[in-house]
Image (cartoon, rainbow, N blue to C red):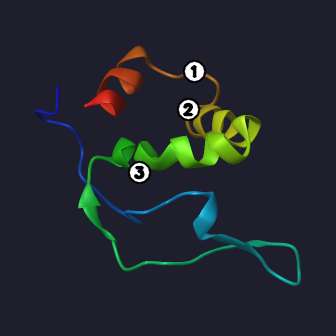
Amino acid sequence: MLKNRPQVFHHGDYHIGNMLLTPDESVAIIDLNRMDTGDPWEEFNRIVWCSAVSPYFASGIINGYFNHQVPEEFFKLLAV
């Protein structure tokens, strides 16, 4: 399943606990000590933490990333 998958730079620990609301009401991402390269969908491996806080937020991240057309293989790869 991982053969020939794209490799991209990513945060490595992307979840709601590493997001801050700034005084001008934009979102800042913190805690970049795990940044590396890998499969772009690997960044969703911490979505469980987001869904524990807000299922709507978690599903919104996934639906927004895929423009509401989430491929079936996404969930299979996420399970890996």
Q: Nearer the viewer, mark 2 or mark 3?
A: 3
Q: Earlier in the sequence, mark 2 or mark 3?
A: 3
Q: Determine the residue located farthest toward the front in the rendered image.
A: 52
Residue furthest to the bottom? 23
**Label of residue 43 in the image:** 3
Q: Position of residue 19 (x, y in %)?
A: 65, 68
Of labels 3 and 1, earlier in sequence is 3
| Image quadrant where residue 59 sits | top right
> Which residue is farthest top?
72
Residue 22 lies, in percent from the top left, at 80, 80
User: Considering the numbered disc 1 on the image, is that residue within a helix, a strand or a loop?
Assistant: loop
Secondary structure at numbered mark 2: loop
Residue found 43% across the figure and 63% down from its top: 13
- Answer above or below: position of 9 versus 46: below
Q: Which mark is residue 59?
A: none
Say if mark 3 contacts mark 1, CB within 8 Å.
Answer: no
Q: Residues within 10 Å of mark 2 (few under 14, many from 20)?
A: few
Whether label 2 touches label 3, CB < 8 Å: no
Can you give x and y, in whole percent of width and height, for residue 7 in the image?
Answer: 23, 51
Q: Which residue is mark 1?
A: 69
The image shows residue 68, relative to residue 62, as above or below, that is: above
Secondary structure of the residue carrying tag 3 is: helix
Q: Decide which of 65, 78 is in the foreground and name it.
A: 78
Q: Is residue 11 above or below residue 67?
A: below
Q: CA distance from mark 3 to mark 1?
A: 18 Å
Residue tagged 2: 66
Under mark 2, the amino acid is Phe
The structure residue drawn at horizontal position 58% and vertical position 69%, both measured from the top left corner, is 18
Please report contact status of discs 1 and 2: CB closer than 8 Å, yes or no.
Answer: yes
Q: Tell me the amino acid under the disc marked 3.
A: Glu
Farthest residue, direction left? 3
